[in-house]
Image: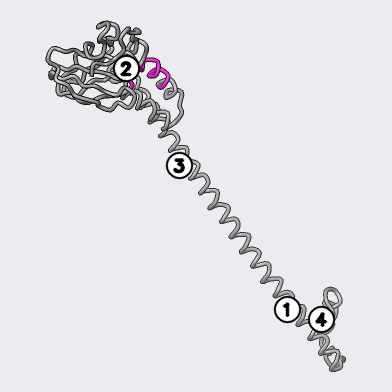
Amino acid sequence: MYRGTRLAILREWASRDGSRDERNTLEREFLDASIGLEDSERATAVRRNRRLRLLTAGLALLLVVTGVGVVALQQRQDALRSQRVAVSRQLAAEALGLVESRPAAAMLLSVEAFRAAPTFEARSAMLTVSAHQYYQAELSGHDDAVSEAAFSPDGRTLATASRDRTVVLWDAVTRRRLATLLRQVLTAEALLEPGEPNAGRARRERLEPLVGEGVQFQQGTSLRTVDQLADGRSPW
């Protein structure tokens, strides 16, 4: 089959007047077949080009949509990050404001601030609160304010005396209540320190009474300084 230049020349010759009479049947069939093949190939090329253009346009649209989605996602992440940073700074500021009055709440707030976002303010708040933090636990067992507290010589038992005229014995390790005794004339020290009544006294200025609930005690050498006693036996 003719294609290209040859077919173009042949088609030009065939279009002249009288040329059809000069061709025999085989030549006419050959020319028609060549023209039909060229037209078919041209139509195929047009369809292919159209599909390529559609595919290119679709890919371009997909890239645009993807780009817009990525930008939107990035903006959302930036907004959430900014929100977490703002929350972290706010919680850190609140924690610092409660260091002296509510140390336990201050510690919780500083931890939540760091969890929200590890900002400079959150780290600073945690360090500041930790430096002022002596709070360890809360023991609830009295119906009135606690007036005294003392540890046993081995530091494993804590006795708290309250204005409700009871003395509660606690396991200092598990913080479990061991017994509740009627106070009468006994003090927390008298129960725990038969040898030297003042040796194991907890410093009262480090206690933070919670009226009607119990006593908060704090860790540190000032609270757990109990001199070695000659008689370490407990009277109970």
* Residue 101 magenta-highlighted: no
Q: Amino acid at mark 1?
A: Ser
Residue 41 percent location from the top left of the image: 74, 76
User: Which quadrant of the structure image shows residue 143?
Assistant: top left
Magenta stretch in the rendered image: 126-136
Which numbered disc flags the more N-terminal residue, 1 or 3? 1
Label 4 – label 2 distance at C-alpha: 108 Å
Per the image, the residue denoted by label 2 is 218
Q: Which residue occupies the foreground of this view, 43 or 100?
A: 100
- Name the amino acid type tagged 3: Arg
Whether residue 130 is in magenta: the answer is yes
Viewed as shown, does residue 57 lie left or right of 233?
right
Q: Which residue bears the numbered disc 1?
A: 40
- Describe the element under mark 2 as helix, strand or loop: strand
| Pair 1/2: label in front | 2
Q: Amino acid at mark 2?
A: Gln
Circle 3 residues within 10 Å: few <14, some 14–19, many ≥20 = few
Q: Reading the chain from its start, which is encountered first: label 3 or label 2?
A: 3
Q: Nearer the viewer, residue 203 or 6?
A: 203
Q: Nearer the viewer, mark 3 or mark 4?
A: 3
Disc marking residue 11 = 4
Q: Which label lies toward us, 4 or 2?
A: 2
Q: Is residue 138 left or right of residue 44?
A: left
Query: Which quarter of the picture shows residue 29?
Result: bottom right
